[in-house]
Image (tube, rainbow, N blue to C red):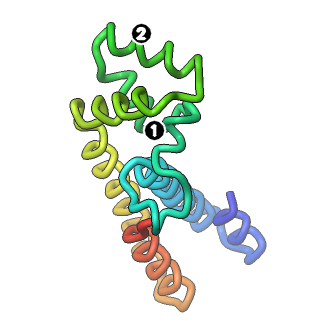
Amino acid sequence: ASMEMGGIVAGADQKTLLLLRELGGALGYAFQIQDDWLDVVADPDKFGKKVAGDIVEGKKTFLMTLLLESCNKVEKMWLLHCLNKKPLDNASVNKVIALYKKYGILETTELRIDGYYSRAEKILEKFGESEFKRDLNKLIKTLKTREY
């Protein structure tokens, strides 16, 4: 919405507004899913918040949704039970992380993040050269490599 609103304020045409909406959506999804992923894999000193905090709090993140879709019935029942009795204890958090690894959730998530950033870059290519485009390219590169 913020990307599109900027275009509205600038008087952009409908085609440009649609591109801005798509660009903002791709960046937003990439950023949020990457934030969920970093919650599990980031260096705690760089991340600035408790690693696996989303798991502890029982948040239904992108990773958790993938896990619920991937795991077997017994694991799913256990997981839903844990999510209902949050906060999760350390043993449960470690088991969730082990399940993420078992089902390749971390790798699948990385691919999804890369896909959204690639989509954003392709959308941005449709815009003419400008200082704004260069700034957005820098922003995408910075976001893609962030560790916190």
List x then y, in percent, for residue 88: 52, 28
Quadrant where the N terminus is found in the figure: bottom right
Asked whether 132 or 47 is in front, the reply is 47
Query: Which structural element holds mark 1?
Result: helix
Instruction: Kindly identify the amino acid type of the residue bearing the numbered disc 1.
Output: Phe
State the CA–CA distance, disc 1 to disc 2: 18 Å
Which residue is painted at 34% across and 62% down in the image? 118
The image shows a total of numbered marks equal to 2
In this rendering, position of residue 99 left or right of residue 132: left
Residue at the (58%, 68%) spot, across then down = 16
**Residue type beneath disc 2:** Met
Sequence order check, earlier mark of 1 and 2: 1
Can you say whether 30 is above or below 62 in the image?
A: below
User: Of all residues shown, which one is farthest toward the front?
Assistant: 90
10 Å crowding of disc 2: few (<14), some (14-19), many (20+): few
The residue identified by callout 2 is 77
Q: Is residue 82 left or right of residue 42?
A: right
145 over 79 or under it: above or below: below
Residue plotted at (50% across, 13% down): 81
Give the quadrant of residue 144.
Answer: bottom left
Q: Is residue 61 left or right of residue 117?
A: right
x, y percent for residue 128: 47, 83
Q: Position of residue 46 (x, y in %)?
A: 46, 68
Front residue of this view, candidates 7 and 102: 102
Q: Considering the numbered disc 2 on the image, is that residue within a helix, a strand or a loop?
A: helix
Q: Residue at x 45, y 82 (%)?
A: 138
Left or right of 93 on screen, residue 28: right
* Residue underneath mark 1: 62
Residue 74, percent from left and from top: 32, 8
